[in-house]
Amino acid sequence: KPCEWHEPPTFTSSGDSGNDTGHLAELVDFFSALKEGRSTRSNIYESYKSLVLYEAIKESSETNEIVDVVYEAI
């Protein structure tokens, strides 16, 4: 039986401090990386791979087919 697809929750609460959605930690790390001259913990290529995997999972759930996950060099 194929699995069902569900949209992930979107947080739009005006009272969100950023801790609940995870954005505050990313911003703190980003500015620390700039200050310290280092890479961020989550680099752009790893984020790209997460997005490619997400798109393949979504396509597979919509088409009921196996979808190859192909990462291109960026």
Image (cartoon, rainbow, N blue to C red):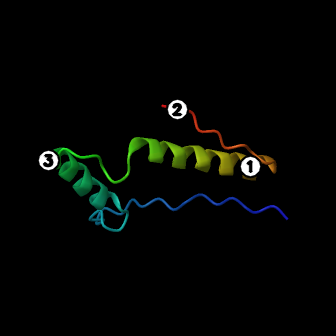
Secondary element under disc 2, as helix, strand or loop, is loop
- Please name the amino acid that badge 1 sits on: Ser
Q: Position of residue 28 (x, y in %)?
A: 22, 56
Closer to the eye: label 1 or 2: 2
Residue at x 33%, y 57% (from the top left corner): 23
Secondary element under disc 3, as helix, strand or loop, is helix
- In this rendering, the answer to whether 36 lies above or below 71 is below
Q: Is residue 65 left or right of residue 50?
A: right
Q: Nearer the viewer, residue 22 or 10?
A: 22
Q: Position of residue 49 (x, y in %)?
A: 53, 45
Q: Earlier in the sequence, mark 1 or mark 3?
A: 3
The residue labelled by disc 1 is 60
Q: CA distance from mark 1 to mark 2?
A: 23 Å
Residue at x 28%, y 66% (from the top left corner): 15
Closer to the eye: label 1 or 3: 3
Q: Which residue extends farthest right?
A: 1
Residue at x 79%, y 48% (from the top left corner): 66
Q: CA distance from mark 1 to mark 3?
A: 41 Å
**Quadrant where the N terminus lies?**
bottom right
Mark linked to residue 35: 3
- Please name the amino acid that badge 2 sits on: Ala
Q: Nearer the viewer, residue 64 or 37?
A: 37
Q: CA distance from mark 3 to mark 2?
A: 28 Å
Secondary element under disc 1, as helix, strand or loop, is helix
Mark linked to residue 73: 2
Q: Quadrant of residue 34?
A: top left
Mark 1 burial class by Cα count in 10 Å: few <14, some 14-19, many 20+: some
Q: Earlier in the sequence, mark 3 or mark 2?
A: 3
Mark 3 burial class by Cα count in 10 Å: few <14, some 14-19, many 20+: few
Q: Position of residue 33 (x, y in %)?
A: 22, 49
